[in-house]
Image (spheres, rainbow, N blue to C red):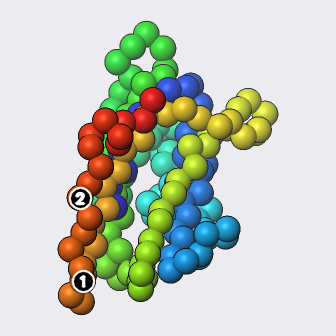
Amino acid sequence: TYLAWGVNNNGWWGEGEIKFYMDGDGEYPTICGTGTEDYFCGSYNFENQDTHRYETFTTPYAGLSYVGAPDGLYQANQRFGMYRWHITDPIRFESDLRVTIQALGWREGGRYLPLKDDIASVAYWYQTLPAAPFPPLPPKDELEIN
């Protein structure tokens, strides 16, 4: 999984849970994480405790590989790139899989802040069994989120 995140506010952005709904689970997730940075094997808001700046890191299976500085006058518009390859901890499913992430940050005083950030992802999987052909993808206009 690769996740690109464009922040549109001035605070911590990575508090949202990543949830996996597998094989018919719908109301409650099969797997529920504790926060965005935790899922990508980071901690403490990806912050270097000495410099108080974001710290990139890369490992064979997870990392925060990109931190883009804001390109405006204020602190919003930072960009991040994160990855996690489930090689040693595969997500196994039989028939269906849905993965969601909350866009959730912090307000002043430690209160949650629902976000309207720019988030894009891609996921790859290995399929060893024969399967029916996949249906065609929807037209690109139907994939656009307004």
Q: Is residue 105 left or right of residue 38?
A: right
Residue lying at 51% horizontally and 76% vertically, measured from the top left: 22
Residue lying at 31% horizontally and 79% vertically, measured from the top left: 87
Identify residue for label 2: 136
Dot 1 or dot 2: first in sequence order is 1
Q: Is residue 29 left or right of residue 60?
A: right
Q: CA distance from mark 1 to mark 2?
A: 15 Å
SS for tag 1?
loop
Q: Is residue 45 left or right of residue 94?
A: right
Q: In the figure, 19 relative to 13: above or below?
A: below
The type of residue carrying mark 2 is Pro
Residue lying at 59% horizontally and 57% vertically, measured from the top left: 17
- Quarter the C terminus occupies: top left
- Give the total number of marks visible in the rendering: 2
Instruction: Looking at this view, name the residue that lies furthest to the top.
Output: 73
Residue lying at 50% horizontally and 26% vertically, measured from the top left: 8
Q: In the figure, 11 relative to 70: above or below?
A: below
Instruction: Looking at this view, name the residue that lies furthest to the bottom.
Output: 129
Is 61 or 141 nearer to us in this picture? Answer: 141
Residue 80 seen in render: no
Identify residue for label 1: 131
Residue 116 quadrant = top right
In the rendered image, residue 82, in percent from the top left (x then y), is placed at 36, 52
Q: Is residue 21 left or right of residue 69?
A: right
Residue 106 quadrant = top right
Of the numbered discs in the image, which one, if any, rests on residue 40? none
In the rendered image, residue 65, in percent from the top left (x then y), is placed at 30, 50
Is 145 or 50 nearer to us in this picture? Answer: 145
Is 27 or 68 nearer to us in this picture? Answer: 27
Is 143 or 3 nearer to us in this picture? Answer: 143
